[in-house]
Amino acid sequence: MSLRDQPGPFFGDFGGRFMPESLIAAIDELAAAYESAKADPGFQAELAELHRTYTGRPSLITEVPRFAEHAGGARIILKREDLNHTGSHKINNVLGQALLTRRIGKKRVIAETGAGQHGVATATAAALFGLECTIFMGEVDTQRQALNVARMRLLGAEVVSVTTGSRTLKDAINEAYREWVTSVETTNYVFGTAAGPHPFPAMVRDFQKIIGEEAREQVLALTGRLPDAVAACVGGGSNAIGIFHAFLDDADVKLYGFEAAGDGVDTERHAASIERGRPGILHGARSYLLQDEDGQTIESHSISAGLDYPGVGPEHAFLADAGRAEYLPATDTEAMEALRLLSRTEGIIPAIESAHALAGALRLGRELGPDAIILVNLSGRGDKDVATAGEWFDLFDEGAVQS
Amino acid sequence: MSATPLSVGTRIAERRIDGRGVLVGYLPVGFPDLATSIDAAVALVENGVDAIELGLPYSDPVMDGIAIQQATQVALSAGFRIRDVFTAVEAVRSRVDAPVLVMTYWNPVVQYGADRFADQLRDAGGAGLITPDITPDSAADWIATSVRTGLDRVFLAAPSSTDERLKLTVENSRGFVYAVSTMGITGARADVAASARTLVERLRAAGAENTCVGIGISRGDQVAEVLEYADGAIVGSALVTALAERGVAGVAATAAELATGLRSGTARPQAH
């Protein structure tokens, strides 16, 4: 069977729909609407037209030889999702779900966000489609991503700072679920990653798989062959499944997901769910999860707000167990070094999330050697991360204040 | 102790003979500490509560409002462990005559092992589980385990549930069906939503024998109102808030006030 043909709700032992009864009707409605949209050429055409005229698709690929000198001389090619409108791959999914929201006749959307990339994308789509929009963001993240909070508000969205639990992405999802239970008659939940209950993992993947479909053709056209390896960062895993998907049945193309290792996977401060977690149920699906002996979720840690999540999408859990993709850690320090290296060698400032994939590519290149071609998903741009990088590398003048 | 568990359904049937419904009270284990949470649960029964729900504190309680979130967070921060639930169930059962259910999100049970959890709960004298974040179609393991152990399995029904799903919920529940009064999370509300009455009627049409209504009930008059059409009224956040603010004496007083709704409540006609 083709690995590309997995409709959910289960991916091997992972996935499912473990949800409160109050939300089942809405999830069923969404699943049915998505099935009908998927088969509707009108829906697909409208989404494609939006991507052409609004997102800016197809996104470029860029070969980065000066960066690649630091990766054992392997050829490194970036898929430039950072050039999309709103600055990341998140827009691919959000436009699809916004069209679906209109199709089921709801006038309001809610979403969770970590780094703010998905929140900004959702607020953007809500503005474009004339929908009311509320974004839930952990208080820790509203502080480290203050610029994105302002962006969302500028776009007309309400931003709710979540002060419960660890005050990061997982708690933003909890709060969004609570709001959804309360307002489900009028409100659609635009989920940001390929996790959560069915139909989200399959639906978000389908909206993101355009990344890999474009990149596969582009790399073939540029190099005359398929890449040896594809690398992407993995939090929930939407950009990774998006670029992996087109290559799943290309057995010779190795797939690598890089999880946020924070201070290191042997410390207590990381977000490496597949590397250090075990199967459990969180946010509606069975997947790898950072949890204690009693099944209490353990708080994750990463310098990257977008990867700071203790779970991972179920299709990645399946691909890991099946041996089709390999999931490796990249620490805060490795990611920040890769961020600076790409900035200085190629003039491209990546998102800290994507810098985890770049850090991985540097290691892969040294392993695979100079004949290798490595495709890296540059899932987002680093504008939002300049303050974090400024502090990390001590780039600010003493006493300077942004005005 | 591994006798047949005392089902909440049995207690509902006994009260029905007396011509009244039941009052079900929720408190989380380990809040503000294990011993006090046990004393508080005992105080509920001593002040008129017919059945207890002991909440298992969980890191990601998506169906709970702020009162219960804060209490369970206190319990977790103080080092709550799953085994404390069995300690609490056994202690409450040894001190008062009331069935004790455990209300739990699903992952802790999965990680403990559903069979192991069920065996220890039964041995402690527990009645069964209320499972707010799974539905019968995602709970095959638990259904098999509860059949084996004779424990109650209380699934939730919502105003948004289709008739087909209500039927599924009724067929797979044992003890009672938990009717969620409104589309929302736990927490006290000024009025119990009219949707509760409609949902209970729909559950009866789907074949439900016992239906208890929860979410938003915080006063004796609301208990009385709900018992006009349902077999039981479930109160959680109001008790948790009373315990947080005024200790065991406070939660006892709140339980006594809620129980006034039992005396003034009109017994539901038995024919159904």
Image (cartoon, grey):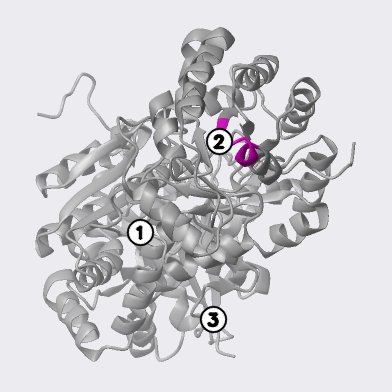
- Taking A326 as reference, is B63 above or below it? above
Residue A245 picture location, percent across and down? 46, 78
Q: Relative to A144, is B93 on the left or the right?
A: right
What's the residue at 53%, 87% (across, down)?
A250
Give whichever of A395, A267 is nearer the camera. Answer: A267
Chain letter of the residue beneath label 3 in the structure image: A
- Marks 1 and 3, Cα distance to the nearest angstrom? 29 Å
Give the residue displayed 22% in from the left and 68% down from the top. Answer: A95
> Which quadrant of the figure has residue A137?
top left
Secondary structure under badge 1?
loop
Which numbered disc, 3 or 2, marks the residue closer to the eye? 2
Identify the mark at residue B193; answer none if there is no mark.
none
Task: Give how far apart the Cα atoms at labels 1 and 2 are.
Answer: 45 Å
Residue at the (67%, 27%) spot, across then down: B80
Taking the image as drawn, is residue A333 in sight?
Answer: yes
Q: Which residue is mark 3?
A: A253
Residue B242, percent from left and from top: 48, 16
Residue B20 badge: 2
Which secondary structure lies at badge 3? loop
On-image quarter of the C terminus of chain A = top left
Label 3 to label 2: alpha-carbon separation? 69 Å
**In front of the other: label 1 or label 2?**
2
Q: Nearer the viewer, residue A48 or A307?
A: A48
Mark sitting on residue A191: 1
Left or right, B211 with respect to A94, comes to right
